[in-house]
Amino acid sequence: EDKVVQSPLSLVVHEGDTVTLNCSYEVTNFRSLLWYKQEKKAPTFLFMLTSSGIEKKSGRLSSILDKKELFSILNITATQTGDSAVYLCAVEGLEDYKLSFGAGTTVTVRA
Amino acid sequence: DGGITQSPKYLFRKEGQNVTLSCEQNLNHDAMYWYRQDPGQGLRLIYYSQIVNDFQKGDIAEGYSVSREKKESFPLTVTSAQKNPTAFYLCASRTGGIGYTFGSGTRLTVV
């Protein structure tokens, strides 16, 4: 059974801090790893990672994948209150593009 | 604008009743998925469909049923056999490319 573990489960930071979210996985047939941000409703897409060692960046967010050690990190620099959300990590398998999700990390950014 | 529409946003069900959650997409996506989200847990796959008139069980299909008579529509029925249906339900679609598109979800509560 595919398994995705995120850590920490939650954290509280102050505006301007940097946060690092972790995602480790055990998947039989790996296609890609995805990060989503969820604020109360629909998850919104952040990154898709397929290759090791190549950092993807979008503004203050960045992510990298290590396919040898089976983990990914998501970094948020200079955090803002708008970054408060649940961040979901998901791994996509080769079979039917199904996603296996971790439990998520709840990030709270205080002003 | 293209997207996924889920309705209703909130749904209350009495014990023993069947209810149907609607999911419609105008993205011309082939594959559609239903996920369930419980507090503190990641999304879990209920059912998915890769093409019209075909669908497969996900990890937690018991107590649920689906149909895929049209490409645009993938309704989910929560039957009385589902013992703990109170949850947040998310529909998603996908076609090649990058990741999934999610609907805004339906929050189902058993009263």
Image (tube, rainbow, N blue to C red):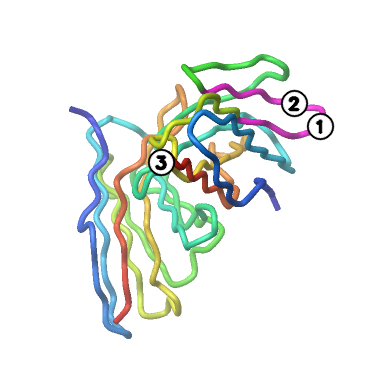
The picture places residue B80, in percent across and down from the top left corner, at: 36, 80
Is label 1 on the same chain as label 2? yes
Residue name at image x 48 percent, y 36 percent: A36
Which element carries disc 1, helix, strand or loop? loop
Which residue is labeled 1 in the image? A69
For the residues marked 1 and 2, what is the alpha-carbon distance in whole angstroms? 6 Å
Among the two numbered marks 3 and 1 on one chain, the one whose residue lies closer to the N terminus? 3
- Contact, CB < 8 Å: mark 3 with mark 1? no
Q: Is residue A54 magenta?
A: no
Q: Dot 3 surroundings within 10 Å: few (below 14), some, or many (20 or more)?
A: many
A15, above or below A59, in the image: below
- Identify the residue under disc 3: A43
Q: Residues within 10 Å of mark 1 (few under 14, many from 20)?
A: few
Q: Quadrant of residue B94?
A: top left
Location of mark 2 (residue)? A66
Q: Chain for mark 3?
A: A
Q: Are discs 3 and 1 both within one chain?
A: yes
A62 within the magenta span: yes
> Residue at 65% across / 46% down in the picture?
A6
Are the residues at dot 1 and dot 2 in contact (C-beta closer than 8 Å)? Answer: yes
B23 lies left or right of B62: left
Task: Give percent across and percent down for residue A16.
Answer: 51, 28
Q: Earlier in the sequence, mark 2 or mark 3?
A: 3
Q: Chain of mark 2?
A: A
Q: Dividing the image into 4 quarters, which one contains the C terminus of chain A?
A: top left
A6 relative to B9 in the view: left or right:
right
Magenta-colored span: A61-74
